[in-house]
Amino acid sequence: RTSRGLGLASIAKASSLRIVGGLSSAETGDWPWQASLQYNNIHRCGATLISNTWLVSAAHCFRDMSHPHKWTATFGALLKPPSLKRSIKTIVIHEKYRYPEHDYDIALVKLSKQVEFTSHIHRVCLPEPSETFPYDIYAVITGWGALTNDGPTPNALQEATVKLIDSNTCNKKEVYDGDITPRMLCAGYLEGGVDACQGDSGGPLVTPDSRLMWYLVGIVSWGDECAKPNKPGVYTRESELFIIRIGEYHLRRLYPRPWIFTLLGGLGG
Ligand code: 4AZ
C-alpha cells in the first residue's frame, strides 16, 4: 500500500461514499477547489480551481456553448445559495479536442475577477508533468452530477472514493475495448456501484500525498452510463497533458511547463 492509499483511508469514510446512488454530501469547505460551471445560471459541469483566476474543466462541457459571457462559476458546497460567484472571461479548449471524440477532453476557464483564497475556497495542487500515479490507489471524485444514471441532481456537493484502474484492464474487450487513449485514465470499480455521472463532467479526481496535500489526478470526462459493472468512469489524465500558450504570467509562474492550448475566442485582456 502506498502512503496515498493510507492517507485517504483515514480521511475519507471510504465505503459509504458515492456520487451515484449515495447519500453522502460533502461538508462546507471539504473540497475547496471544486467549482460549479453554470450556463444561464444552470449547473452544467464541474471545474477545479488551479490558481486565483483559472479553473480546469472538460472541453466537452463547452460544445455549442463556448461563449464565455453566458457562463458563471460558483464556489461553496451548495449550488443554491453559492458562497461565491464569478463571471467567466475566457474559455480555452485544448487544441486537439474534437467533438464528439473524448480524447484531449480538457479546457481552461478564466474568471473575470480573481478569488481570494480562504480555508473554504482555494486551489488544488497539480502534479509534476513526470509524475505517475500508481494503480490501485484510492482517489476522490466530487460533483453535483446525477445521483443515478439520468436521475435527479443534488443541491449539495457529493463525494465518492474510487480506485485507479490500469489502462490495459480498462481497454479489455468487456470493458472499453481499446477506446482508452494515453490521455485517459479509468477509475471506479469493475463491479460497479460507485461512479461519476452526468453533470460531474469537468470536475476533479484528486488524491492526497503523504502530507495530505491534494493533487489533481484527472478530470471527469466520460463513461458508459454510470456505475455499471465493467464500465468505470473515464477521466482526462492530468499529468499527460497541459496548459499551453495562454501566457498568463502567474499561472506560468505557478506551473512552469509547456503550454499546449490554443485560445478560443481571443484572449480578451
Ligand atoms: C456525462 O454524461 C458523464 N460514469 C460523466 C461521467 C460519466 C458518464 C457520463 C462516468 O457527463
Image (cartoon, grey):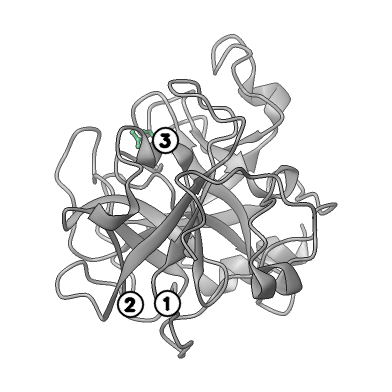
Q: Residue furthest right?
A: 130
Q: Is residue 23 above or below residue 199?
A: below
Q: Amino acid at mark 1?
A: Asp
Instruction: Give the quadrant of residue 25.
Output: bottom left
The x, y position of residue 35, in whole percent, is 37, 65
The x, y position of residue 81, in whole percent, is 15, 75
Q: Are marks 2 and 1 in contact (CB under 8 Å)?
A: yes
Tell me which image quadrant ligand 1 sits in: top left
Cβ of mark 1 under 8 Å from ligand 1: the answer is no
Q: CA distance from mark 2 to mark 1?
A: 5 Å
Cβ of mark 3 under 8 Å from ligand 1: the answer is yes
State which tag comes first along the sequence, 1 or 3: 1
Q: Amino acid at mark 2?
A: Glu
- Which secondary structure lies at badge 2? loop
Instruction: Give the quadrant of residue 171.
Output: top right
Query: Can I make out residue 47 in this image?
Result: yes
- Which secondary structure lies at badge 3? helix
State which tag comes first along the sequence, 3 or 2: 2
Q: Which mark is residue 30?
A: 1
Q: Are marks 1 and 3 in contact (CB under 8 Å)?
A: no
Q: CA distance from mark 1 to mark 3?
A: 26 Å
On the image, numbered disc 2 is attached to which residue?
27
Judge by depth and name the residue closer to the eye, 188 or 259: 259
- Which secondary structure lies at badge 1? loop
**Relative side of 204 to 6, left or right:** left
**Relative side of 154 to 194, left or right:** left
The x, y position of residue 107, in whole percent, is 51, 47
Query: Can I make out residue 193 in this image?
Result: no
Crowding at dot 1, Cα within 10 Å, few <14 / some 14-19 / many 20+, comes out as some
On the image, numbered disc 3 is attached to which residue?
60
Q: Amino acid at mark 3?
A: His
